[in-house]
Amino acid sequence: MKTCNQCGVVKDCLDFHKRSDAPDGFRHACKVCVCASSKAWYKANPEQKAATNKVWQQANPEKRAADNKAYRQANPERHAANTKADRLRYPEKYKARSAVRNAIRDGRLTRPNECSSCNVSCKPEGHHDNYDEPLNVRWLCKACHTAHHNQLNQLQEA
């Protein structure tokens, strides 16, 4: 049994996170208090939390992709609902992407084997500068496409 330093309640040791450098091997605050204080910090510091998340995501792309895939498989209804909501929120994007997929399928548009920006051999993604011209796409590798959108986001924020 251990007393939480934040709420003052005596709880079982299983209600505390382990901490190897603590004298008794557990954190000073219980799991409930740690969770509550973490949520409060996240709410008070959204910019720092977002920056921390971004750094982790860039350092762990495989883990992030695996986590996303696991979520989609575990929650197919929610994923389908989110996808449908995005289609309704951005109909011009959905129509442009569909037009490109159909044109590739029908042979009216050919996907090159390299990025048009950095000339790296890959399976590039189509980028629309203007959704009103759905078959006018730039073929960019994942890295160039992400970098391009990051630049667009920075310009919009400024």
Image: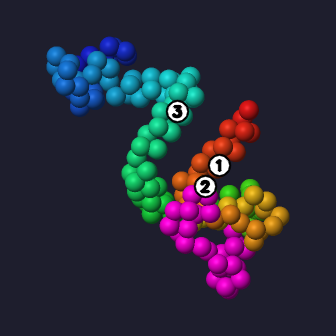
Q: Which residue has dot 3 on it?
A: 51
Q: Are marks 1 and 3 in contact (CB under 8 Å)?
A: no
Q: Which image quadrant is residue 112 in?
A: bottom right
Q: Which residues are magenta?
A: 97-123
User: Dot 2 surroundings within 10 Å: few (below 14), some, or many (20 or more)?
Assistant: some
Residue visible at 50% across and 67% down in the picture: 121
The image's mark for residue 145 is 2
Quadrant in the picture for the N terminus: top left
Q: Which residue has dot 1 on it?
A: 149
Query: In the visual, does 5 lie left or right of 85?
Result: left
* Location of residue 140 in the rendering, given as x and y in whole percent from the top left corner: 60, 61
Query: In the visual, does 41 lie left or right of 96?
Result: left
Residue in the foreground of this view, choosing between 2 and 69 = 69
User: Dot 3 surroundings within 10 Å: few (below 14), some, or many (20 or more)?
Assistant: few
* Location of residue 96 in the rendering, given as x and y in whole percent from the top left corner: 74, 67
Q: How many marks?
A: 3
Residue in the foreground of this view, choosing between 7 and 121 = 121
Residue 1 makes an appearance in the image: no
Amino acid type for the residue under numbered disc 1: His
SS type, badge 2: helix
Q: Are marks 2 and 1 in contact (CB under 8 Å)?
A: yes
Q: CA distance from mark 2 to mark 3?
A: 20 Å
